[in-house]
Amino acid sequence: MTGKTFKIKIIILVSLLVLISLLLAGCTGIFYIPGASYGYYIWEENNSIFIEWSVDKKDTEFNGVISTDGKITAYKLKNWEEGDDIIEVGEDRIEFSAALSSQDYSDGFIFTPQDYTYLEFDLEINNGYELSRVNVGGFLENPKDDVFRIGKDYFSQLEMKPWYRKHPFSEFFYKLSANKYFTFLYLFILGIIIIEILRVTVIARRKRKIMWVMISYAVLIIIEICIYFILRFLTG
């Protein structure tokens, strides 16, 4: 690989990372793929609450109740099948039951609540609760309780969280820090493999090979130390 080719690949990689970061920062809705994604997806846009559900091409029942201490002033259905899907909308309560199949990938609705302090969700899949399938907000937070509430400012507060506190980043960093010995051993072994590959490819063509190998291992140790302090900071 020539130096010019390597620089071009680095520029492309950095550009992609910047683009992904901008898309994540500017995302107001939720990205999911009907017919491949499975579960509920809830987000807010322009003071309206969107709730949609999708399934990976199999017969699945979705039913639930959404209630509030305010008023529901408007609602709109999405991909609704009259007769098969049922929804009842009251002043402060929405109750629905809808089925998806291998030909029907997603359903949903939009509603606008006013003068409220909370929204309460009771969402079931096949007459049971699957919290890992309930995704709230652009970073797909999962609720901790079967019947859960979110406050009026929930979505705006979620956007204010630093990126490393958002799901799935927070969960990933927590899992790394939960077993530090395994994490550091795994990274150290991975580092050794990378250094040995560099030793027989790049370093082999350089003068003072031993010095470059020693520098590589010193850098690996410094990286391990930095990761330790970074994980401590990110996970509190």
Image (cartoon, helix red, strand yellow):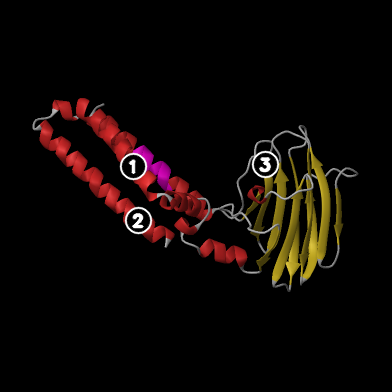
Position of residue 47 in the picture relative to residue 232 (left or right): right
The residue at 48%/51% (across/down) is 169
Q: In which image quadrant can residue 112 be found?
A: bottom right
- Looking at the rendered structure, the kind of residue marked 3 is Tyr
Query: Residue 159, how many percent across, how many down?
Result: 54, 61
Question: Residue 230 colored magenta?
Answer: no
Residue identifier under label 3? 38
The residue at 12%/31% (across/down) is 209
Depth order, front residue of 9/122? 122
The residue at 47%/46% (across/down) is 20
Q: Which quadrant is home to the C terminus?
A: bottom left
Residue reaching furthest right?
A: 83
Position of residue 207 in the picture relative to residue 120 (left or right): left
- Looking at the rendered structure, the kind of residue marked 2 is Ile
Depth order, front residue of 12/43? 43
Q: Which SS class for mark 3?
A: loop
In magenta, the rendered stretch is: 11-18
Real-space Cα distance between discs 3 and 1?
35 Å
Q: Which SS class for mark 2?
A: helix
- Looking at the rendered structure, the kind of residue marked 1 is Leu
Residue identifier under label 1? 185
- The total number of labels drawn is 3
The reply to whether callout 2 and callout 3 are in contact (CB within 8 Å) is no
Query: Is residue 132 shown above or below 156?
Result: above
Label 2 vs label 3, nearer the camera: 2
Please tell me how crowded label 3 is: few (under 14), some (14-19), or many (20+) other residues with Cα within 10 Å.
many
The residue at 83%/57% (across/down) is 95
Query: Is residue 195 shown above or below 182?
Result: above
Label whose residue precedes the other's in the sequence (3 or 1): 3
Query: Residue 48, how many percent across, how many down?
Result: 70, 61
Q: In which image quadrant can residue 187 be found?
A: top left
Q: Which quadrant is home to the N terminus?
A: top left
